[in-house]
Image (cartoon, rainbow, N blue to C red):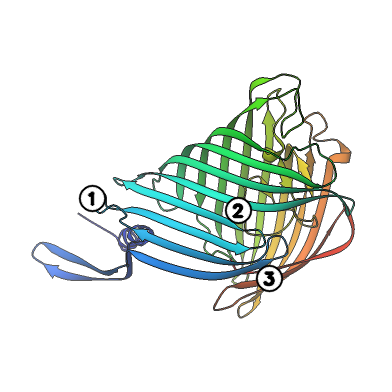
């Protein structure tokens, strides 16, 4: 069998991506009628622990703790059990089980408990604050054809407690059970996690959400018809990074989301727009320059985001952000002039030995003045 150097390195990357091996090196020896390829590596311990610190303006400070156990059931190889804990003012706990099946198939389950406070603003004035306690069970299967892409299908049950802290959105102090089916496609070949100079990222998700409509009380769903209701939600994010010389890059991103269906969508599944954090407790939190964290709550959005990154000295880099587009809570007014939003900002960052550190200033047409943002860690 003929193999190129690229074939060999791709095979090693695939082995490394399993999380079971490290410290690879290989050699080629002459043999009768050809060559022998010898690959050497070390097996990673079945049990590992890691601790990290993260801080940003949106989620606050937290200590991230991870425990990983490989080959959980010794009769079932290539299975992994992970425990993730964020000890913070907005804490979460997550348990993940993954099982490899043959070469490209995986299946597993996630269970997470998340606590988060999200504030809404209008022209810089606090209008509402939600206290959320979310319990999520996700059963899924994955097709992983290569190291850069995956197709994921799953079923989720959400037990949500969402209460008004400030304002009166009519949310009762109780739990609501929701469920949804989803299909996700993800592709990424960016060349770095914090200062990517080239590559793509594509994230597409479709959800069919099911919930019980009510008429006799005000809860997270308040609609004219009782009984089982459903809504279809679609999300698309496409990012392309283009290198300019050896020290800078342009980043172009298109991001859009919408809801279809006549039933009123539960508040928890609306899109919460604003903030710059790289952490995302929920996949419907959308970053936008110049808006405070989760400042706006909408069902429809279409954004174009442009950024220029410049690695001007050593590990120091700067970024200019320019975000614009349309968002609204109703489909009919999605692209009205009053739904246009524009934000811009500038960031200064450094990749340290421990983690990246980034400081930003930004503003938007929705708020007067300038706001700041600090991020420490991945």
- State the mark number for residue 240: 2
- State the mark number for residue 271: none
Per the image, the residue denoted by label 1 is 75
Q: Quadrant of the N terminus?
A: bottom left
Q: Residue at x 58, y 78 (%)?
A: 352
The crowding category of the residue bearing disc 3, from other C-alpha atoms within 10 Å (few below 14, some 14 to 19, many at least 20), is some
Of the numbered discs 1 and 2, the one sitting upstream in the chain is 1
Per the image, the residue denoted by label 3 is 358
Left or right: residue 341 compared with residue 207: right
Mark-to-mark CA distance, 1 and 3: 46 Å
Q: Considering the numbered disc 2 on the image, is that residue within a helix, a strand or a loop?
A: strand
- Please state which of residues 181 and 360 is positioned toward the viewer in this rendering: 181
Left or right: residue 39 compared with residue 340: left
At which x and y percent is residue 140?
A: 45, 40
- Please state which of residues 286 and 213 is positioned toward the viewer in this rendering: 213
Q: How many marks?
A: 3
At which x and y percent is residue 146?
A: 39, 50
Mark-to-mark CA distance, 3 and 2: 21 Å
Q: Considering the numbered disc 3 on the image, is that residue within a helix, a strand or a loop?
A: strand
Image height of 106 relative to 266, above or below: below
Q: Considering the numbered disc 1 on the image, is that residue within a helix, a strand or a loop?
A: loop
Task: Check contact, mark 1 vs mark 3: CB within 8 A.
Answer: no
Q: Residue furthest front?
A: 173
Observer-side mark, 1 or 3, equals: 1
- Please state which of residues 273 and 351 is positioned toward the viewer in this rendering: 273
Task: Check contact, mark 3 vs mark 2: CB within 8 A.
Answer: no
Q: Residue at x 79, y 56 (%)?
A: 292
Q: Residue at x 43, y 63 (%)?
A: 67
Observer-side mark, 1 or 2, equals: 1
Q: Quadrant of the C terminus?
A: bottom right
Image height of 169 relative to 9, above or below: above
Image height of 53 relative to 296, above or below: below
């Amino acid at each position: 069998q003929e193999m190129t150097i690229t074939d060999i390195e791709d095979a090693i990357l695939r082995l490394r991506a399993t999380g079971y091996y490290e410290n690879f090196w290989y050699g080629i020896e002459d043999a009768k009628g050809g060559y022998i390829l010898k690959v050497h590596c070390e097996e990673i311990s079945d049990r590992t622990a890691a601790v990290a610190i993260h801080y940003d303006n949106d989620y606050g400070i937290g200590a991230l703790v991870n425990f990983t156990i490989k080959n959980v059931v010794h009769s079932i190889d290539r299975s992994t059990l992970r425990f993730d804990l964020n000890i913070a003012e907005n804490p979460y706990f997550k348990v993940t089980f993954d099982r490899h099946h043959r070469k490209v198939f995986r299946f597993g389950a996630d269970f997470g408990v998340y606590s988060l406070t999200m504030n809404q603003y209008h022209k810089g004035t606090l209008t509402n604050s939600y206290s959320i306690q979310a319990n999520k069970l996700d059963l899924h299967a994955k097709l992983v054809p290569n190291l850069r892409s995956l197709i994921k299908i799953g079923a989720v049950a959400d037990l949500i407690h969402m209460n008004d802290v400030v304002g009166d959105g009519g949310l009762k102090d109780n739990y609501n059970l929701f469920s949804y089916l989803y299909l996700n496609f993800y592709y990424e070949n960016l060349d770095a996690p914090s200062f990517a100079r080239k590559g793509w990222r594509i994230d597409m998700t479709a959800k069919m959400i099911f919930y019980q409509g009510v008429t006799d009380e005000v809860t997270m769903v308040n609609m004219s018809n009782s009984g089982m209701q459903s809504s279809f939600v679609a999300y698309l994010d496409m990012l392309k990074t283009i290198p300019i010389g050896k020290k800078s890059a342009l980043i172009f991103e298109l991001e859009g989301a919408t809801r279809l269906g006549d039933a009123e969508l539960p508040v928890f599944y609306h899109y919460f727009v604003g903030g710059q954090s790289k952490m995302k407790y929920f996949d419907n939190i959308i970053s936008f320059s110049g808006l405070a964290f989760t400042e706006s709550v909408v069902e429809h959005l279409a954004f174009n985001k442009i950024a220029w990154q410049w690695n001007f000295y050593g590990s120091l880099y700067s970024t200019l952000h320019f975000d614009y587009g349309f968002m609204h809570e109703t489909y009919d007014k999605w692209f009205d002039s009053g739904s246009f939003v524009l934000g811009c900002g500038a960031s200064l960052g450094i990749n340290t030995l421990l983690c990246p550190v980034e400081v930003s200033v930004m503003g938007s047409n929705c708020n007067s003045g300038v706001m700041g943002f600090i991020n420490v860690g991945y």
